[in-house]
Structure formats: C-alpha cells, structure tokens
Amino acid sequence: MSASFIHRSILTVGFLSLFHAAYSAAQHRSYLRLNELDFSHLPLDIFIQALVSLFIIMYGVLQVVGDFKEIKASAELENKSWETFRNIPSFYIFCHRGGKSSIQSTKSSLEEIE
C-alpha cells in the first residue's frame, strides 16, 4: 500500500508544527532572557502544540510506512533439530593451547627429551 497524498501531507504538517513549537520555545526563552525573567516552564500553548504535533507525526509515520511485516520467530526454527540449533560452526577453535597440554603431547615431549 503506497502512502497517499493526504497521509504525506499530514506528516508534513506535523513536522512543520513541531518545528514551529521548537521555534516558539526558543523565542520565548530569548524573550525571558532579554527581560531578565526567570525561566520556570514553557507556556501551555507551546507545550500543547508540541505534544499534538508529536502525535500527528506518529500517526503520519504509521500511515506512510504501510503494513508491518509479521514476526514469526518459530518459522525459522521449525526445520531445525535441537542438535543443529546448538551447533554453531563459527565457535569452533582448532588451533588452541589445549593440544599443547594434552597427555599425549606431554608424553611425546618427555620421550623426546630422554
């Protein structure tokens, strides 16, 4: 399902409204700084505009993206047995120090010394 023009317009309006709320918050902060007033909180209209813009953006993104793909974790594991499930070839180590400290290699090294 392709995104319709209406859904893309809703998403654009949401982003524009959110940017406007951010710009208004910055302007309010600079107004307070110029008048040497304390900043306690944002005005209610800027806060509500930012919150409504956020919900509009979430709705627009969900409509533009389209249908979600269903997650089927068990579908991948249906054709695997328990033995192959735990078998991870990338964890195999063939060149390690265990061969150097095995009983056979110590016996052979002792025989070479004698």
Image (cartoon, rainbow, N blue to C red):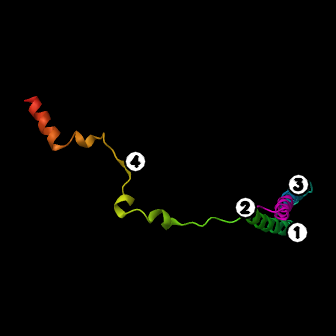
Instruction: Please say whether residue 6 is one of the residues in the magenta stretch.
Output: yes
In front: label 2 or label 3: 2
Question: Compared to 46, does 106 lie above or below?
Answer: above
User: Which residue in the structure is indicated by mark 3?
Assistant: 30
> Disc 1 and disc 4: Cα gap in Å?
57 Å
The image quadrant of residue 87 is bottom left
The image quadrant of residue 37 is bottom right
- The x, y position of residue 98, in whole percent, is 25, 43
Question: Compared to 51, does 90 lie above or below?
Answer: above
Residue type (three-letter) at the residue carrying disc 2: Val
Are dots 1 and 3 in contact, CB under 8 Å? no
Residue 62 appears in the picture as rendered: yes
Residue type (three-letter) at the residue carrying disc 1: Asp
SS at badge 3: helix
- The x, y position of residue 48, in whole percent, is 84, 69
User: Which residue in the structure is indicated by mark 1?
Assistant: 45
**What residue is shown at x 86% (from left), y 56% (from top)?**
26
Quadrant occupied by the N terminus: bottom right
Please tell me which residue lies in front, 80 or 96. Answer: 80
> Disc 2 and disc 3: Cα gap in Å?
37 Å
Residue type (three-letter) at the residue carrying disc 4: Ser
Quadrant occupied by the C terminus: top left
Of helix, strand and loop, which mostly describes the magenta segment? helix
User: Which residue in the structure is indicated by mark 2?
Assistant: 65
User: Which residue in the structure is indicated by mark 4?
Assistant: 90
Q: Is residue 46 left or right of residue 64?
A: right
Residue 41 appears in the picture as rendered: no
